[in-house]
Image (tube, rainbow, N blue to C red):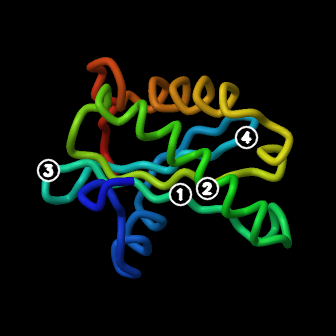
């Protein structure tokens, strides 16, 4: 993931988890909110040890999710912060499934294809 797209910092995560909207799919949960500065697109990928106790599996899953997100980021509207959290079922999924579900979640959130999806937070 390019550095300019990374969501970083404990305070930023805390603010996002406190004031967010979310959509869920079979493999992922997408938490999102408008970027407080109104510019940029910041994304984080979280794979908990509850998904797998093995770091190798967690890291592989994170790499696959980031690769799918890299394909979708050019279609995203700017000014959003989001966290993609993997569910335990993601271990059984394939890259094509991840790409399809992430695109669907981003559309539901209004981050892809124009619809702003913004409301009061």
Q: Are marks 4 and 3 in contact (CB under 8 Å)?
A: no
> Mark 1, mark 3: which one is toward the viewer?
1
How far across and how far down the image is residue 14, in percent?
A: 43, 75
The residue carrying mark 4 is: 27
Q: Residue at x 46, y 59 (%)?
A: 44
Residue marked by disc 3:
38
- Which comes sooner in the sequence, label 2 or label 1? 1
The residue at 41%/31% (across/down) is: 72
Quadrant position of residue 102: top right
**Residue at image coords 14%, 50%:** 38
Measure how far apart labels 4 and 2 are at the Cα level: 12 Å
Please say if the residues under marks 2 and 1 sit with CB atoms less than 8 Å apart: yes
Which mark's residue is nearer the viewer, 2 or 3?
2
Q: Position of residue 5 (x, y in %)?
A: 30, 54
Mark 4 or mark 3, earlier in chain: 4
The 10 Å Cα crowd at callout 1, few under 14, some 14 to 19, many 20 or more, is many
- Measured from the top left, where is residue 84 in percent x and y? 54, 51
Distance between mark 2 and mark 3 Cα atoms: 27 Å
Report, in whole angstroms, how far the alpha carbon at label 4 lies from the one at label 3: 29 Å
Lateral position of residue 104 relative to residue 4, left or right? right
Q: CA distance from mark 4 to mark 1?
A: 13 Å
Q: Is residue 74 above or below residue 69?
A: above
Q: Earlier in the sequence, mark 4 or mark 1?
A: 4
Which residue ends up furthest to the bottom in the rendered image? 10
- SS at badge 2: helix
Q: Which mark is residue 45?
A: 1
Pointers 4 and 2 in contact (CB under 8 A)?
no
């Amino acid at each position: 993931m390019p550095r300019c797209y990374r969501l970083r910092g404990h305070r930023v995560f805390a603010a996002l988890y406190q004031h967010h909207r979310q959509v869920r799919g079979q493999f992922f949960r997408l938490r999102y909110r408008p970027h407080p500065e109104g510019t940029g697109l910041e994304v984080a990928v979280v794979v908990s040890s509850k998904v797998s106790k093995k770091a190798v599996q967690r890291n592989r899953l994170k790499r696959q999710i980031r690769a799918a997100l890299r394909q979708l980021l050019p279609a995203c509207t700017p000014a959003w912060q989001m966290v993609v959290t993997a569910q335990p079922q993601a271990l059984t999924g394939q890259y094509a499934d991840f790409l399809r579900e992430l695109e669907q979640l981003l559309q539901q959130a209004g981050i892809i294809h124009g619809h702003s999806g913004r409301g009061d937070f």
